[in-house]
Amino acid sequence: MTPQLGKLLLFLGLGLALLGGFLWLGGGNWLSWFGRLPGDVRVERPGFRLYMPLVSMLLLSLLLSLVLWVVRRLGS
């Protein structure tokens, strides 16, 4: 493993830990809309619950793709 990859993994891990700590300590109130977007499927019946956050996952995928694209552009 190259030292650059090790640094990248370390910073990504620290960033995820900070984000997780922020959300865990109650800072996630501003994310209450996530998972409730139009297009997210929610079916609740007695004894049955189905939840498929389709639009939320598409939005998250787009955001992560954009971030990785920017990281690649800055890295080369």
Image: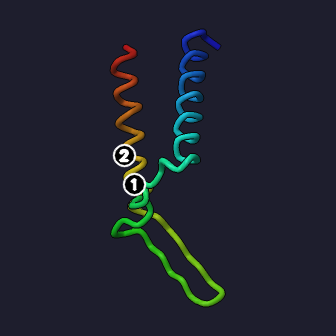
Q: Please give the label number shown on residue 75.
A: none
Task: Kindly indicate whether the residue at mark 1 contacts the one at mark 2 (C-beta within 8 angstroms).
Answer: yes
**Which amino acid type is marked by label 2?**
Leu
Q: Residues within 10 Å of mark 2 (few under 14, many from 20)?
A: few
Q: Residue at x 42, y 58 (%)?
A: 34
Left or right of 38 in this view: 20: right
Q: CA distance from mark 2 to mark 1?
A: 6 Å
- Residue at 62% in and 84% down: 48
What is the quadrant of residue 21 in the picture?
top right
Q: Quadrant of the C terminus?
A: top left
Q: Which residue is mark 1?
A: 58
> Would you identify the image quadrant in which residue 12 lies?
top right
Q: Is residue 21 above or below residue 37?
A: above
Image coordinates for residue 54, horizontal then vertical, percent: 43, 63
| Kind of residue at disc 1 | Leu
Marks counted in the figure total 2
Q: On residue 62, which mark appears?
A: 2
Does residue 31 sit above or below 15 in this rendering?
below
Decide which of 52, 19 is in the foreground and name it.
19
In the displayed image of the protein, which residue is found farthest to the front? 26
Of helix, strand and loop, which one carries label 1? helix
- The spot of residue 2 in percent (x, y) is 60, 10
How crowded pointer 1 is (Cα within 10 Å; few <14, some 14-19, many 20+) is rated as few
For this rendering, which residue is in front, 23 or 5? 23
Which residue is at the far bottom? 46
